[in-house]
Image (tube, rainbow, N blue to C red):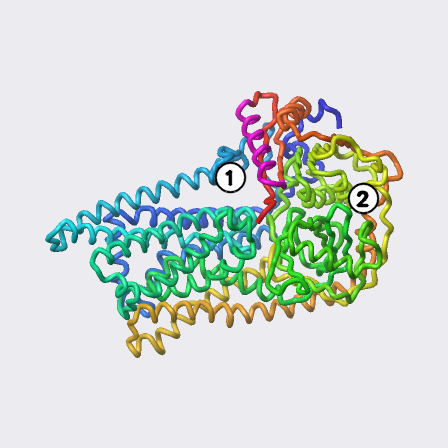
Amino acid sequence: MTENSAHHQPLLLRKDDDDLGCLEKTSLFLSSSKWVLKIAIWAIFTAWVAFMFLLPLESVDDWQKRWRQATKGTLFGITGSMFLLYSAPILIIAFLAIAYLIISGGEEQLHRKQITKRPRFSLWTFPVLIDGIFGVVSAAEMIGIILFSLYIIWAVTLYTLKNYKLLSWFHVVSKREESILMLELTGLRLGFIGMICLAFLFLPVARGSVLLRYIHIPFEQATRYHVWLGHLTMLLFTLHGLFYVIGWAMQGHLLKELTDWKNVGIANLPGVISLLAGLLMWVTSLPGVRRINFELFFYTHQLYVVFVVFLALHVGDFVFTIAAAGIFLFMLDRFLRFCQSRRTVDILSARSFPCGTVELIISKPANLHYNALGWIFLQVRELSLLEWHPFSVSSSPLDGKNHLAVLIKVLGKWTGKLKEQILNLSEEGPETQALLQPHSKISASIEGPYGHESPYHLMYENLILVAGGIGISPFLAVLSDILHQIKDGKPCLPKNILIVWAVKKSDELPLLHTIDMDSICPFFSEAINLEIQTYVTRESQPPLEEGKLHEVVEASVFPRSNGSRMSILVGTGNIIWSGIYVIVSTIGLVISVALLNIFYINPYQVNYWWYKGLLFLACMVASVLIFGGLVIALWHLWERKTSAEDELEDNENIGIVQQSSNGMKKNSGKEQYANSIRYGERPDFGEIFGSISERWGSVDVGVIVCGPSALMLSVAKECRNSNLKRKNNQPIFHFNSHSFDL
């Protein structure tokens, strides 16, 4: 592709370029159905958020009280009315999202997006805050932060004014009693605002949630929203408890109140236990503590079970329903992940590189789908029965139906033990490659793959991929994916690709050759303009044995695995089964609560708040285990049947592993791309982006970064600066991050 032609390439093809078949025609019925579902989802979500935002107003609060009073005598009582107001909207949105994803074929068709002749900005990919407490924040995320901040300020202000009005209702005879009463009323309001925040807290950490799949936010990006909400929620709950503690201490009966467990009303002791569990999770999740001791953070975070159970005991059933939907969806996701991770998965092959990186080839069924920018969670039982670690997938889904690959950098104790285990089982020395034999003593369990619902790296015609060290791993998958797409003759693919890779030492350079681009697509240079710039930051000149960096790695033929493959229950799997699982479990929750009310709570007039809170939580658990478990059992039987059919149709495991193990072959001919290696330098992104602006012209450029936070901040800053200074004949840079540290 010439330089001049690149200046006039749009984000995707224009409408008059449809001779390539990019603009697939969609039936009017399907298109209309999708729009109806989208409108319904946004209408319900807007109404739900508006209700909670306006709740501090007297008129809205009075309407809620009348609604609760009108439904008090029904089968579900106040609990049901509160559930309909606070939790049902989220579950209904989940149902509609399932329908939308099914109609869309399980993923959004990026090639059907609106086609424009000029580049345009996107709120989600325009970084506005760079180096603050929130990290890199896009314009869309900034709007969300501002709205949440406005809600907190709005709610605290209005509730404070309400509290002053309430003082006239109480017969306080001194300023001291007035101060105590204000402390307790303020604590009560902060606790309610904390419950509103808690309604959102668990939604981002449901890794395979249909909600995240619908809005195209993968879990590694959604995790940061959980972190932000977690800090805010725990701050509110801490102030909630602190104000009560100060008030009780001023009255002289602090210990009595802390240990009080009321049957009707709020039970204090469970609240104390829940808050202590939350504080322990909060403190150990702070960046400094987590960086020093990740295991401490991981294990203490399992106290969320204690936090949720004692919260239900503390507030009772009808208050707990404010946050029930998010917690329920998280429980569904957690149980599904538990079922998936019980399976032992074959490691088809493994090798250890001199730079301290390990590659694992993992067996998967042909009907397990994922995208190139995917993640898995890996557990190796010989190393630890409790530790799970996230790794980016380094292979394209088009590399083979029955395997995926991950590259693992040896950085800590766990990864060091993994490398040692591989070398102990190998037949060759540690300085070359170590290949596992089948039926070896390494057993893996897998969660995932997770990631974007659709391959968003294909939506950009121009790509800049910036990696730091092992951050090259997901971009190997992206590059392989693009080459396979070119080989298969699929249109609407990236045309210009620049890879910027910063490594510490030259012994990491062979990682780039774990894929054989010429073997995948022999003539890819005719379809894409690929350039790779590598920066070796801690070496001033090439090593004397530089020629050995690209030596041939001998191919190895692996016997077939014993058939133990990854489960398809989690991740970007079958949306129909995922939808059935969510819907049936939710119906099961309604049935469980109804039966509990009909046969126990109403006949025996059970009115203890804490006990009804525990019973409601038990119904949530029972619906997940019984109703959801039934769906999982049927899903598992379907999986076994389809896997058996695939096994009969496809016997490619040997060839796949052989090809993967042979990925570092030395190219016999001239390289089809510009490849420069600079020693003793760091990437100058101002110079790089300036050069791109001159060469590529007025186009949309997708920038994807995977690496340390310093690298991510530098790229985000340059994207923002370039966009703010942009002229009409220059690109718009769209910043996307692929999290390096989860």
Compared with 161, 644 (above or below) is below
Is 645 situated left or right of 545 in this image? left
Task: Give me the residue at 64% from left, 70% from top.
Answer: 637
Which numbered dot is residue 135? 1
Secondary structure of residue under mark 2: loop
Q: Position of residue 632 (x, y in %)?
A: 58, 68
Task: Give me the residue at 66% from left, 34% from top.
Answer: 464
Of the residues under marks 1 and 2, which one precedes in the sequence? 1
Whether the magenta-drawn stretch holds residue 539 is answered as no
In the rendered structure, which amino acid carries the disc numbered 1? Gly
In the rendered structure, which amino acid carries the disc numbered 2? Asp
Q: Position of residue 622 (x, y in %)?
A: 47, 71
Please indicate, yes or no, whether residue 235 appears anywhere in the rendered image: yes
Q: Position of residue 432 (x, y in %)?
A: 82, 50
Secondary structure of residue under mark 1: loop
| The residue stretch that appears in magenta | 706-725
Give whichever of 194, 301 is nearer the camera.
301
Q: Which residue is mark 2?
A: 516
Whether the magenta-drawn stretch holds residue 719 is answered as yes
Give whichever of 575, 389 is nearer the camera.
389
Task: Give me the residue at 49% from left, 33% from top.
Answer: 128
Please indicate, yes or no, whether residue 36 appears anywhere in the rendered image: no
